[in-house]
Image: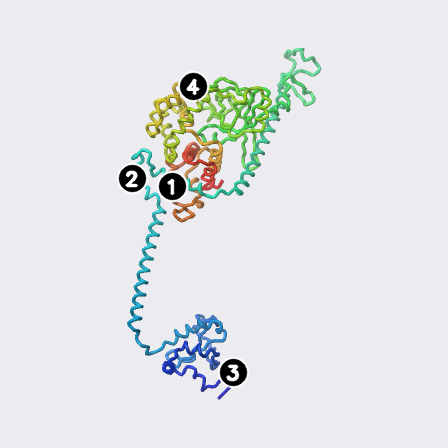
């Protein structure tokens, strides 16, 4: 019976004619692949099997079969006359389906391969095995090198098993762990992001300074008028007529005074114009107490009477602020050094200058500052435009530096340069250990040590300073011939310190950690806040975040007197040691800001 579907003639007799059997094709010297290439016509339409439409349990496993990969077999798999039918959608993928067709139909009674092909197969097998062996060796070497790089501490420990002081000048385990922090300097400097942050910080700083300046003007102008003794005199009496106290009249402090009774003109002649001739500067207290060291102080030096005052800006929460006098307006003098007893002048104000005060002269100072005899204020920033303007109008010499002071600076600079080479890569270990050692020597807790203590300290830490340089430095520091010197001042003078720009970021990092302003930070807070995601070794995969974090915590703990907290002085000593080996300020800023997110 013949029938026609969509113009294609078909019959039951010729349905299996294209593949009558594998033997017939082989006898004709053809393969299924060659036959399909020679006969590219469409295959015939198969019989319609309605029984396949019945639901079955296996339907879920074959619920979706793409047409492009469908193969429909109408005869059993073991039948010698297997017929494969491919849908018309497969015409564009003829080559792939021919390969699959050849896999399905495997010719029988194939001849055995010749010795030539056996030899080729053996060569191919040998090459594959050798290539796989080489690949395995290379992979093992990469894995071994990666593990070695991921655990630098183990490699360092093997080299430094003899102890820290085995070789003079050799890097120890602690030194190499601390040097891992230098990796942050390799991060590309994001000028745009840093510019935005600096602009926002500058705007906030200008607002603070403006608030303090306004408060200073209000305080001194109102006090100059209201607190003038002449205001106690009645306006109707001549100024020269004295008023004697009377038992029938109330004391002056209890009398009611109104604004219209206040005289505006006084003999003090302090006006806003006179107070405007001033130099405004920012300062910080040189102290190892974190709470005092992070105080925000703003000072003013008035040119008309050579007086100065210092105010403290305090912020409580986000919206509440207060501006209070820290040092009352008055004329002050140097309390130590070559200029001891000399009154402060305009030339004494510059970035990095120290202003010294006697703690006993200021009753309003905090108790933590009164513990020390001297209160030292370091100028960190100054209004250079106002300073230059006042210097132009001033008659005093621009440079008040004497030849003796210049010689002192040269001597200390030579000592610092000599020690800088010895501290280049050992700075963290030496400076943190030096601070702890000096504190242990200070049995009385006064912060003062004698010459023998300082000599012994330099020998313990193997810091080589010639006898002449040491004596010269001691004569400079021991200007009052007391025989004892503050060990913080000795360390700053002999070893040196990082500039105020770098210390600004160290204080920012500590203030972010010490949000309660207690002066010390628990180790748990440091562990939570320290982030090593952007460390170059973490990015490259050579180290993990935890390894970098542990190396930082181990080196920082070595500087701490207590195992569970870090004080500001110890935090500053750590970064002081890192700063010695870093030339550019931008690199140091990256080292501080990147892990702390500031």
Q: Measure how far apart labels 2 and 1 are at the Cα level.
A: 17 Å
Between disc 1 and disc 4, whose residue precedes?
Answer: 4
Question: What crowding class fits label 3: few (fewer than 14 Cα within 10 Å), some (14-19), or many (20 or more)?
Answer: few
Between disc 2 and disc 3, whose residue precedes?
Answer: 3
Which residue is disc 1 drawn over? 551
Any part of residue 488 in sight: no
Between disc 1 and disc 3, whose residue precedes?
Answer: 3
Between disc 4 and disc 3, whose residue precedes?
Answer: 3
Whether tag 4 and tag 3 are in contact, CB under 8 A, the answer is no
Circle 1 or circle 3, nearest the eye: 3
Q: What residue is rendered at 67% in x and 20% in y?
A: 264
Residue 479 marker: 4
Q: Measure how far apart labels 2 and 3 are at the Cα level.
A: 90 Å
Q: Measure how far apart labels 1 and 4 are at the Cα level.
A: 42 Å
Residue 214 is situated, as x and y percent measured from the top left of the image, at 61, 29
In the picture provided, is 396 more to the left or to the right than 271? Answer: left
Q: What residue is rendered at 49% in x and 26% in y?
A: 353
Helix or strand or loop: what does disc 3 sit on? strand
Residue 166 is situated, as x and y percent measured from the top left of the image, at 29, 35
Q: Measure how far apart labels 4 and 3 are at the Cα level.
A: 118 Å
Residue 161 marker: 2
Residue 474 marker: none
Q: Measure how far apart labels 1 and 3 are at the Cα level.
A: 81 Å
Residue 172 is situated, as x and y percent measured from the top left of the image, at 33, 37
Circle 2 or circle 1, nearest the eye: 2
Which residue is disc 3 drawn over? 8
Any part of residue 153 in sight: yes
């Amino acid at each position: 019976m013949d029938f026609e579907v969509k113009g294609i003639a078909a019959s039951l007799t010729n349905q299996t004619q294209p593949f009558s059997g594998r033997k017939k094709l082989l006898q004709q010297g053809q393969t299924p692949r060659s036959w399909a290439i020679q006969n590219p016509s469409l295959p015939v339409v198969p019989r319609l099997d309605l029984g396949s439409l019945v639901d079955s349990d296996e339907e879920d496993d074959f619920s979706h079969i793409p047409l492009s990969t469908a193969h429909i077999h109408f005869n059993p798999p073991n039948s010698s006359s297997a017929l494969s039918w491919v849908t018309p959608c497969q015409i564009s993928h003829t080559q792939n389906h021919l390969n699959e067709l050849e896999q399905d139909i495997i010719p029988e009674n194939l001849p055995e391969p010749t010795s030539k092909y056996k030899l080729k197969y053996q060569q191919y097998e040998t090459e594959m095995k050798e290539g796989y062996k080489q690949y395995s060796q290379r992979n093992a070497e990469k894995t071994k090198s990666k593990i070695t790089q991921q655990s630098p501490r183990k490699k360092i420990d093997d080299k430094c098993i003899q102890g820290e002081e085995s070789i003079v000048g050799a890097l120890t385990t602690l030194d190499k762990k601390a040097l891992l922090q230098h990796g942050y300097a390799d991060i590309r400097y994001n000028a745009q992001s840093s510019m935005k942050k600096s602009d926002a910080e500058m705007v906030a700083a200008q607002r603070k300074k403006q608030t303090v300046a306004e408060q200073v003007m209000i305080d001194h102008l109102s006090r100059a008028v209201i607190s003038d003794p002449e205001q106690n005199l009645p306006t109707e009496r001549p100024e020269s007529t004295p008023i004697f106290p009377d038992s029938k009249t109330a004391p002056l402090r209890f009398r009611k005074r109104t604004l219209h009774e206040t005289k505006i003109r006084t003999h003090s002649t302090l006006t806003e114009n006179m107070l405007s001739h001033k130099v405004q500067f920012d300062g910080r207290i040189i102290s190892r107490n974190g709470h005092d060291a992070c105080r925000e102080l703003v000072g003013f030096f008035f040119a008309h009477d050579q007086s100065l005052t210092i105010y403290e800006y305090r912020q409580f929460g986000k919206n509440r602020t207060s501006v209070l006098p820290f040092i009352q307006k008055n004329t002050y003098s140097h309390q130590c050094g070559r200029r001891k007893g000399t009154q402060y002048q305009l030339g004494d104000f510059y970035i990095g200058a120290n202003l010294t005060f006697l703690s006993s002269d200021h009753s309003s100072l905090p108790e933590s500052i009164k513990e020390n005899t001297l209160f030292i204020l370091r100028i960190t920033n100054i209004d250079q435009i106002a300073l230059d303007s006042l210097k132009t109008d001033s008659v005093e010499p621009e440079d008040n530096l004497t030849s003796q002071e210049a010689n002192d600076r040269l001597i200390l600079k030579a000592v610092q340069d000599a020690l800088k080479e010895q501290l280049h890569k050992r700075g963290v270990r030496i400076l943190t250990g030096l601070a702890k050692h000096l504190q242990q020597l200070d049995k009385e807790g006064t912060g003062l040590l004698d010459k023998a203590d300082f000599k012994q300290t330099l020998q313990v830490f193997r810091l080589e300073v010639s006898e002449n340089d040491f004596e010269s430095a001691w004569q400079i520091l021991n200007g009052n011939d007391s025989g004892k010197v503050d060990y913080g001042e000795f360390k700053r003078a002999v070893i040196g310190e990082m500039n105020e720009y770098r210390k600004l970021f160290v204080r920012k990092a500590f203030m972010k950690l010490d949000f309660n302003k207690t002066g010390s930070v628990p180790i748990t807070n440091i562990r939570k806040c320290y982030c090593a995601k952007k460390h170059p070794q973490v990015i490259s995969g050579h180290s993990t975040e935890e390894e970098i974090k542990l190396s930082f915590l181990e080196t920082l703990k070595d500087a701490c007197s207590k195992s569970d907290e870090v004080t500001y002085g110890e935090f500053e000593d750590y970064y002081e040691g890192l700063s010695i080996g870093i030339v550019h300020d931008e690199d140091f800023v990256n080292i501080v800001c990147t892990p702390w997110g500031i």
